Amino acid sequence: MAGMYGLGRVINVIPIAAGNAFKLRGASAVTFVCTGNDTFTVTASSSFGGSYSSPGNIITRKATCTATNGTAAWVESTQAASNAVTIASGTVVFSVLTSQLADPNDYVKVSVGGSGLVTAILHDLIVQRKPSNLEILGA
């Protein structure tokens, strides 16, 4: 079976997303991959430079892994509804669906309490484009 490249077809990626706002409207969801002993807090706004606030307690599902190099299994779990996720070490992955954001909030941001790292993977793109024609998200 032949493979297909994902960037532009089903995903777009923001490698360093901690504290950086971006528009989510061109995808069905964003999955955040976070590492470090930290708290990761989701906020939303109706404009890029606008005032960011909690989108509500939208995070209930997450997956954690004790390793950051692929040498341990993922563990799926639930948490009390919140707009934040905290881990002591390893990696946590959680998603925000566009349907979870109240209109007109099209922009999201994940802030970290310390030195945690965040990568944002936007998936289920509404329009497929070659990578060079993908929309610039952080503007």
Image (cartoon, rainbow, N blue to C red):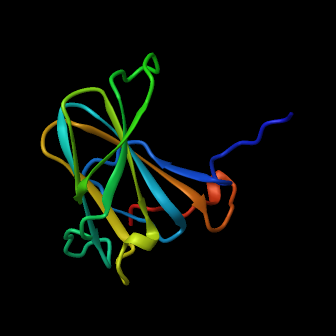
The C terminus, quarter of image: bottom left
Q: On the picture, is 123 further left or further right than 99?
A: right
Please tell me which residue is depicted at 21% across the width and 68% down the height of the picture.
54
Extreme-left residue of the structure: 113
| x, y percent for residue 77 | 35, 42
The number of callouts visible is: 0
Q: Is residue 50 above or below residue 15?
A: below
Extreme-top residue of the structure: 71
Quadrant in which residue 33 is drawn: top left
Quadrant in which residue 69 is drawn: top left
Please tell me which residue is depicted at 35% across the width and 79% down the height of the picture.
102
Q: On the picture, is 65 further left or further right than 38?
A: right
- Looking at this view, is 67 or 106 the one in front? 67
Quadrant in which residue 52 is drawn: bottom left
| x, y percent for residue 22 | 38, 62
Please tell me which residue is depicted at 76% across the width and 42% down the height of the picture.
4
| x, y percent for residue 109 | 29, 59
Extreme-right residue of the structure: 1
| x, y percent for residue 1 | 86, 33
Extreme-bottom residue of the structure: 104
- Looking at this view, is 40 or 51 the one in front? 40
Q: Is residue 93 above or below residue 138?
A: above
